[in-house]
Image (cartoon, helix red, strand yellow):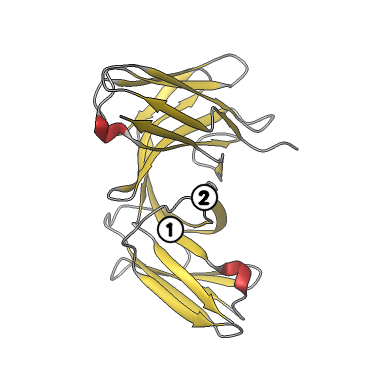
Amino acid sequence: KAGVTQTPRYLIKTRGQQVTLSCSPISGHRSVSWYQQTPGQGLQFLFEYFSETQRNKGNFPGRFSGRQFSNSRSEMNVSTLELGDSALYLCASSLVPYNEQFFGPGTRLTVL
Amino acid sequence: GESVGLHLPTLSVQEGDNSIINCAYSNSASDYFIWYKQESGKGPQFIIDIRSNMDKRQGQRVTVLLNKTVKHLSLQIAATQPGDSAVYFCAENESRASGTYKYIFGTGTRLKVLA
């Protein structure tokens, strides 16, 4: 069974731009969560989607948003990028919420 | 590969010895705990989990201990191998009556296995 895939793997943007990251969960998994990982803050929860609905949200500004499609694939969007948004963005999928999560390799975003 | 944390506490262990990685969690209402392993350039990988109605759980070469009194979690790795070198995170999760929850991750410990 294929694992969680994330695209793109690497991305370079400039301040003020916006970016969309994509996550394809493991087949059959309906819950997708997004995390931001930085050396200073570690892993921080962004939000979780289940059945196309956002169930949980972390403490991030409204510039960070996401959505989930009917096939459980998810995208997250960051608008008006800031230098501090440079991070590894990780997606994790699980069968249902509150279940074992499987992480993708992440998308490394660099904001210049 | 990428570094997930440049200033993480580091535990150096001789190959074949046992490793103990500790984690203090913050929320006394947390009822589900997970240990993850993250190798350079990869996403976190689930190792073992434990629910708050247990104080010990064993897997293959790994044991997780939970002490709810002092809000402490530990991961024990038996017969540590070079492939165990990675960053290890604990995560806590509080399920709420509303059905929502949120994972909170520790900052991580870097395990270095010495040959």
Q: Position of residue A3 (x, y in %)?
A: 66, 38
Query: Callout 1: helix, strand or loop?
Result: strand
Query: Callout 2: helix, strand or loop?
Result: loop
The kind of residue on which mark 2 rests is: Pro
Determine whether, in the image, residue B59 is placed left or right of residue A99.
Answer: right
Quadrant the C terminus of chain B occupies: bottom right
Q: Quadrant of residue B16?
A: bottom right
| Structural crowding at the residue carrying mark 2, measured as other residues with C-alpha within 10 Å and reported as few (<14), some (14–19) or many (≥20) | many
Q: Position of residue B3 (x, y in %)?
A: 43, 53
Q: Measured along the vertical axis of the image, is residue A97 above or below residue A41?
A: above
Q: Position of residue A46 (x, y in %)?
A: 36, 33
For the residue pair B6 and B27, the one nearer the viewer reads as B6
Label 1, on which residue?
A: B89
> Which label belongs to residue A100?
none
Q: Alpha carbon of mark 1 to alpha carbon of mark 2: how far?
A: 8 Å
Assess whether mark 2 and mark 1 are in contact (beta carbons under 8 angstroms).
yes
The kind of residue on which mark 1 rests is: Phe
Q: Measured along the vertical axis of the image, is residue B16 above or below residue B48?
A: below
Label 2, on which residue?
A: B44
Instruction: Tell me if I can see residue A2 in this picture.
Output: yes
